[in-house]
Amino acid sequence: MNTLFISTYNYLITIGLLKNNKKIAIKEIKSDKSHSIFLIPSIESILKENNLDIHNINEIIVINGPGSFTGVRLGVIVAKTLAYTLKINIKTITSIDALAISNNILKRKIVSIKDNKGVYFAIYKNNKNISQIKYLSKEEFDNNYINEINIDNGVLDIEKIALFLKDFDTLNPHNVKPIYVKEIEVLK
């Protein structure tokens, strides 16, 4: 089974290919605010470099947030569109869970993602989320979690993520939605 992995939640676009949950290729592109310019060409490029066609993909894994509002929306829309048009499986994982699973620390840890005003985070023990994803100002976060092991902006291990999701149910592409921790004005 060939899996396409898509992550656009932060400044780093990560596109990966897995065969039977084993990484065969990964492409990372730094992009501050130009995800739309790089995402589709990167998918095309990684497929071509590995002698695959989009029709050889059986499954898509996409990080659905939280993170950059526009980045998350773009990654989810591309993943949904591909899954729907190709009639293939799609699975989602949060950026926080993906970072937790990718990290080898098993004891209690905080996994966080910072934005301009604050911090998205969740608490994990033995790589199991023991809290909901929360959002605090940077000052509140620092005051309350200063002595915790904090994992932020870690490297994604797409093999660990794929193995974690192996037994998860696939989703109907129409039901895949970006996750926003902060309610945005347009949705109020």
Image (cartoon, rainbow, N blue to C red):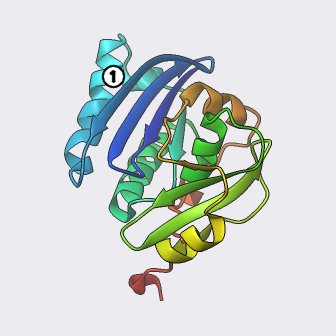
Considering every residue shown, the one lying at the far bottom of the view is: 188
- Name the side, left or right, on which 110 lies relative to 9: right
The answer to whether residue 94 of the structure is visible from this angle is no
Q: Position of residue 85 (x, y in %)?
A: 44, 42
Q: Position of residue 8 (x, y in %)?
A: 39, 47
Along the line of sight, which residue is nearer the eye, 29 or 56?
29
- Image vertical order of residue 125 relative to residue 27, above or below: below
Specify the amino acid type for callout 1.
Answer: Ile
The answer to whether residue 158 of the structure is visible from this angle is yes
- Image vertical order of residue 48 relative to residue 95, above or below: above
| Residue at image point 46% right, 71% down | 118
Mark 1 Cα within 10 Å, few/some/many (few <14, many 20+)?
some
| Residue at image point 65% right, 50% down | 149
- The residue pinned by badge 1 equals 46
Along the line of sight, which residue is nearer the eye, 58 or 100?
100
- Name the side, left or right, on which 68 lies relative to 36: right
Considering every residue shown, the one lying at the far front of the view is: 147
- Image vertical order of residue 11 relative to residue 181, above or below: above
Along the line of sight, which residue is nearer the eye, 152 or 68?
152
Quadrant in the picture for the N terminus: top right
- Name the side, left or right, on which 65 lies relative to 134: left
| Residue at image point 66% right, 38% down | 101
Give SS at disc 1.
helix
Q: Position of residue 46 (x, y in %)?
A: 33, 22
